[in-house]
């Protein structure tokens, strides 16, 4: 009989510990594994899943969620939590659409995106200023601003659907990068506005990895008192982080209108938790000081995959929500275990 010597057991324990420490420094492995497992199970039950059209469907559906998630990532990394980004997006998309339809019907798509970005950044910056000046938890402040923004939109701007959006928005929404045809003859497109998510992801990754501002975000999220002693201006860091998240929310709102060919002030309500879940599944901690763009984008793809393709195997929407909740619980336990290995 072969017996494992104490030295062999020590080596196994060291290898196991090395794997967990590596995973702790690369949390994106968790959503990646869940995506692989989910795809394998769905593809095994329904082979129609293995088509390029499925990938295009998931990528197209992930654009708005991904833009939201990139903003939430920065706020979580800075030690805050924002639930007002959908209200910012709804206010910006409806206001900009209304202004363009009523007063500037020939405005170009670049100017419309610029208006959405500026409006979103201004509203987000107000969030950041309030969080710092009130010295209150960001969650509480943004719950308040979420209700205030929705109330302002529905009371003073409008509640009617805009079925006829500006021509430039319609044209850009219909622009495609590439089209493919599925086995059953359906044509599926990868829209041009998908590039917006790619550019935003690259810009966010560059900010976090290569700039002083990025290092300041992690420092403030890790310990704001120490960050202040190191010379970081906490107020400006918070204002800029929330402004950047607002900018992305404004762009997401405009993209949502183009993708759906209508502006509905009641859209996007209730999608906050799914976005935050995607960022947390990607490895960001709600306690701040962590998270990266790769993990966040994989978390967004996982959420979109669950919402879009489980119907292929006959799983009703109620069970999709339960499965997502199970993934979040497993993710919480997984990252908690990794943190213990990381600190031991």
Image: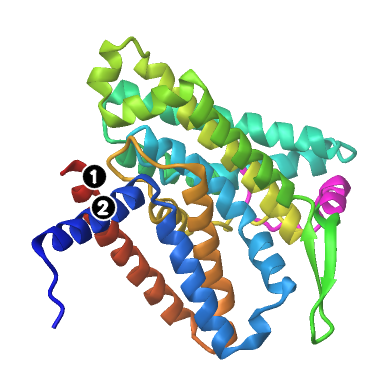
Give the residue displayed 38% in from the left and 18% down from the top: 235
Give the residue displayed 52% in from the left and 47% down from the top: 294
Give the residue displayed 37% in from the left and 29% down from the top: 218
Crowd around label 2: few <14 · some 14–19 · many ≥20 (10 Å): many
Residue 120 visible somewhere in the drawing = no
Give the residue displayed 29% in from the left and 65% down from the top: 329
Does residue 165 lie above or below 245 as drawn?
A: below
Crowd around label 1: few <14 · some 14–19 · many ≥20 (10 Å): some
Who is closer to the viewer here, 40 or 266? 40
Question: Does the magenta-highlighted stretch encompass residue 239?
Answer: no
Residue 288, position in %: x, y? 31, 37
Is residue 108 rendered to the left or right of residue 160? right
Is residue 117 rendered to the left or right of residue 220? right
Does residue 328 lie above or below 318 as drawn?
A: above
Picture quadrant where residue 180 is located: bottom right
Query: From which residue to which does the magenta span run?
Result: 156-172
Q: Which residue is mark 1?
A: 342
Does residue 41 lie above or below 214 as drawn?
A: below
Residue 121, position in %: x, y? 57, 30
Disc 2 is placed on an element classified as helix
Mark 1 vs 2: CB contact within 8 A: yes
Q: Which residue is mark 2?
A: 338
Residue 77, position in %: x, y? 38, 36
Is residue 65 rendered to the left or right of residue 118? left
């Amino acid at each position: 009989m072969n017996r494992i010597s104490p030295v062999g057991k020590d080596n196994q324990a060291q290898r196991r510990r090395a794997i967990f420490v590596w995973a702790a420094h690369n949390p994106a492995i968790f959503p990646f594994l869940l995506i692989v497992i989910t795809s394998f199970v769905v593809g095994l039950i329904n082979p129609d899943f293995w088509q390029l059209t499925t990938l295009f469907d998931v990528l197209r559906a992930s654009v708005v969620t991904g833009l939201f998630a990139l903003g939430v990532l920065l706020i979580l990394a800075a030690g805050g939590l924002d639930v007002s980004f959908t209200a910012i997006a709804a206010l910006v998309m409806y206001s900009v659409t209304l202004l363009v339809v009523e007063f500037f019907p020939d405005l170009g798509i670049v100017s419309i995106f610029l208006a959405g970005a500026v409006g979103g950044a201004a509203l987000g910056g107000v969030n950041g200023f309030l969080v710092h000046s009130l010295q209150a938890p960001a969650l509480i402040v943004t719950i308040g601003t979420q209700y205030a923004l929705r109330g302002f939109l529905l009371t003073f701007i409008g509640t009617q659907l805009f079925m006829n959006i500006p021509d430039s928005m319609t044209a850009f929404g219909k622009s495609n990068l590439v089209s493919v045809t599925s086995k059953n003859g359906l044509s599926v497109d990868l829209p041009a506005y998908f590039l917006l998510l790619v550019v935003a992801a690259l810009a966010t990754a560059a900010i976090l990895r290569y700039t002083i501002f990025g290092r300041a975000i992690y420092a403030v999220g890790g310990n704001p008192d120490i960050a202040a002693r190191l010379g970081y201006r906490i107020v400006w860091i918070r204002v800029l982080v929330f402004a950047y998240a607002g900018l992305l929310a404004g762009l997401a709102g405009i993209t949502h209108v183009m993708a759906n060919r209508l502006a509905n002030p009641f859209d996007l309500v209730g999608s906050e938790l799914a976005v935050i879940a995607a960022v947390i599944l990607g490895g960001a901690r709600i306690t701040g000081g962590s998270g990266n763009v790769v993990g966040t984008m994989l978390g967004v793809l996982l959420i979109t995959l669950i919402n879009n393709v489980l119907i292929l195997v006959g799983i009703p929407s109620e069970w999709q929500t339960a499965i997502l909740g199970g993934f979040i619980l497993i993710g919480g336990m997984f990252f908690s275990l990794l943190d213990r290995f990381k600190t031991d």
